[in-house]
Amino acid sequence: MFKLQPKLDFRRDVEAHVLQKEAAVCGMKDYCGALDILIINIERDGGILYSWKGWTGTTRVGKYDSATKQNKLLYTFDRQVCVSSCSLNKEETLLAVSLAHNNSGEETLKPSNSRNPAFHLHDLHHRFFVVFPVVSVSECLTLLIEIHPVNNTKVLKAVDCRVKVQFLHPGTDHRSVLESHLLLLTEDGYVDQYHVLLTRHGGYKVLMANPERLSKTAERLAEDFCWVQWDTHTQRLYYLTHADKFLLRCVQFYDNRNCETVLELPLELHAKSFTSIKFVNLGFDHFYLERPEPVKMEVFTNTIGSMCVCYSRPSCDKPELIYTVVLVHKDCSKTFRITLGDTTRQHPLFIPIGYYMVVYLHACFLHCINTRQQEMLCHSLFLSGNNAVAGLPSKTGRLTVMHAEEEEESSTALLDLSSGTSYSVQLNPAYLMQILRSDPPFSMADAQRLAALHCLLLHKGSDPDVELEIIEWLCDNATLESFDQIQEFILASLYRINYKMSLGLDKLLPCSSVFDQKDLPACLTEVPGVLCTAEPHAHPVFQGKARSLQGFWSELQWNTERTRYFHADPKPRYRTWHAQADWTKLVTARPSGHMTHLLDNTKKVLSTVDSWRHDGKMLLLPLFQEEDHQQRALIGLTVEKLREHLNTHLPRLGKKKTDILVVNYVAKLLELIRHMLETVWLKHSLGPHVLCLTQPAGPGEWAVFHFMLRILQATRGLCAPLPPGYNTLLAAFAVRLLPRHTFLQYVDHGILRLTETFVSRLLTDFDNSDANEKLKFSVLKRLPEANRFYHMWDHPVSSASICRDYVRNLLGRRDRNKGFAFTGRDKAGFRPEFLPLTHLAKVLSDVEEQALNPFDEQENVDATFVGETALKQTLIQLGFEGK
């Protein structure tokens, strides 16, 4: 399910440096003794702090710079100690260390007898992670050490509980500032902040100013918490308190070293979820307090303004796991009960990837929860048993997440605690394609295939290879009863290219056609083994600067407020069929100023459409090359309706951005249809010859025609426009592939539309055999009288029709202009023996001579042509001449 890309190999990047240091200390060429290496912390800049206990009985603390791949020795203790927590200030002048002391009298910290280095991951502060050796601890000593150069050491605390230390790292580069701020988090349930003032001596020495007064600078930030999480990338502290109710608070630290509580969020938790006060290894970048009924809780945020609070609680007496995802940005929570094979006390791993929250329990299940389109279960992928193959290097108990907001949204960092290796984790498109195809050993329900399709499009849809695979699946796969695959592909793809602009678009842009289904099949509303309960959640309370800050907090606040607005509107989402009524009117409407405005919208869209193939070659399909007035009007109408909807419900986006969004939206729609048609066209190796109506058809043409009908059905269901030229191409395939009576039935039922380009080609390409003549008559009869292209067909009947129209129009003009006088002159070229025809010719000639523009109705038609045509028709009727 996951695709892993190694980022850090601790053994490769750090072990060689440590062995070299030990060899230099021992005076050896190569050190072959045992090492006890501990990764202690990962700072905001990616620097990794670690310690090791060497051969000489010392304990050293070093830093590995992940950017430069360099190692640096920070400090050396002259004896072996247990470094439980450690942090380095941004200027690298101060080192805060928390030492766990042992009262058992045993030398538990001596190196092991193994020749291989022993790797432990101790207190990883990328987001806090805590592992403590199994020893009896009576005291924790917290030190603040000057290391530039090594000089003074100040004891901050000596208490009978564990203490976590963490320097604040502002985002801006202020290396010249002689001030540092240190957080101390204790098992006693409080957080203190120390403000450390520094002074420079001798040009390079950096020392603490008035270290004896350091304790007086301590500021109590939080107390009586039962759970706490530090997010080093965003410089936020989350903690949970419990009085009458559980209340989650967030303290934001700013670049100017100030801080304040910016968020309060009530949570519905069991009263005994958090009771005792001992740190245990349950997570990364946060640490929990041990309790009789363990509850694992984590907070994840995203720069677009989303916040998810995830917590799990294994059942004590039932083979089930209960976990909840609170979607703060959606003002709702979803609680899932998963039936397991046996009673387990394990917690799942929460992995944020993009806007999916992946919940994974080894050998049990894998659940990709859609945190932005959370209404329906079928948009979240659930796998269990043998299908829940994550492809992770170890069990969930040995893995932890290193998520940062500024990382690539489609991936997250995962740390393997057993090996010290970190990975970039993404959803594996090949695995999702197997689910989509239901290839053996997969046998997936429609809901799982729908969820896999959305996962693919939203995370990897921008990859042309992935998009091509999906289109090929659409071509090869038979239609599913529960949902239209082509509609889902179109809507999810269009949603993907715009959803990053604002979370408000989640409720406005259509992302799935199943929302419009009146009676959803049970397979899309239920997942076997999963019970989901969704309910509104208490609104968060924003405080202090969070109400006026830019960035994450302003986005989160706006998203929660907009969500309440959307809850008041029962149907805020744009429905593509909103344009259906206006479109029906436009089909029969006369040219107007409104039509001109719509055509201007169409010009903007068509100027944006990419007319090149993905491989850089010019497209062979005859699309976007003709004036299909109906489709051009529908393109402009779609732009207008979508623009109106977004301006009404999302004015914050601004008119300029909205205009760009809607034009790109409709342009991408046309490109997707063209790309689907292009793919199936190239797959069957079709060439320009298929456009010739007289060429015999082959199996490739049948496959393309069938797929084009599926596209037509999908777009009509959405009232979505087609690229100009699509209807012409579809009619050209139909007239070659279908029996003539079936072709005419398709026209009568509105499946095929007779465009001017198609009709003109039909009249010119086909000869005047009896069968073709009958087809031409049938086609012309089905056209509106104003659009009957008789002049394109060299046939006596078409000539007669042209003459009738000409005579009707000319004589109608004569009736309207009574000033025309009949001269009665004889005209050369007419036979006087046939008096009715002679008289008509004289009337037409007189009108032509006195008209301002006698040929404005029909080109190259005059009285002579009318007379010759009438005689020819008479001879044909009498049998004296052929057609």
Image: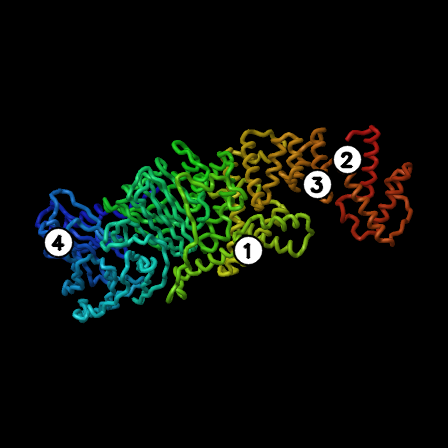
Residue in front for this viewpoint, 133 or 294 = 294
Alpha carbon distance from label 3 to label 4: 95 Å
Circle nearer the N terminus (3, 1): 1
Q: For marks 4 and 2, give the one nearer the viewer.
A: 4
Q: Report which quarter residue 398 is drawn in.
A: top left
Circle nearer the N terminus (4, 1): 4
Residues at circles 4 and 2 in contact by the CB criterion of under 8 Å: no
Q: Is residue 64 something that shows in the picture?
A: no
Residue in front for this viewpoint, 587 or 338 = 338
Q: For marks 2 and 3, give the one nearer the viewer.
A: 3
The secondary structure type at the circle numbered 3 is loop
Residue at 70% across, 34% down: 776
- Residue 624 on image: x %, y %: 58, 45
Q: For marks 3 and 4, give the one nearer the viewer.
A: 4
- Residue 609 on image: x %, y %: 53, 49
Please identify the quadrant where the C terminus is shown: top right
The secondary structure type at the circle numbered 1 is helix
> Mark 3 is on which residue type?
Leu
> Mark 4 is on which residue type?
Asn
Q: For marks 4 and 1, give the one nearer the viewer.
A: 4
The secondary structure type at the circle numbered 4 is strand
Q: Which mark is residue 645?
A: 1
For label 3, the residue is: 783
For label 2, the residue is: 796
- Residue 713 on image: x %, y %: 57, 40
Residue in front for this viewpoint, 394 or 643 = 394
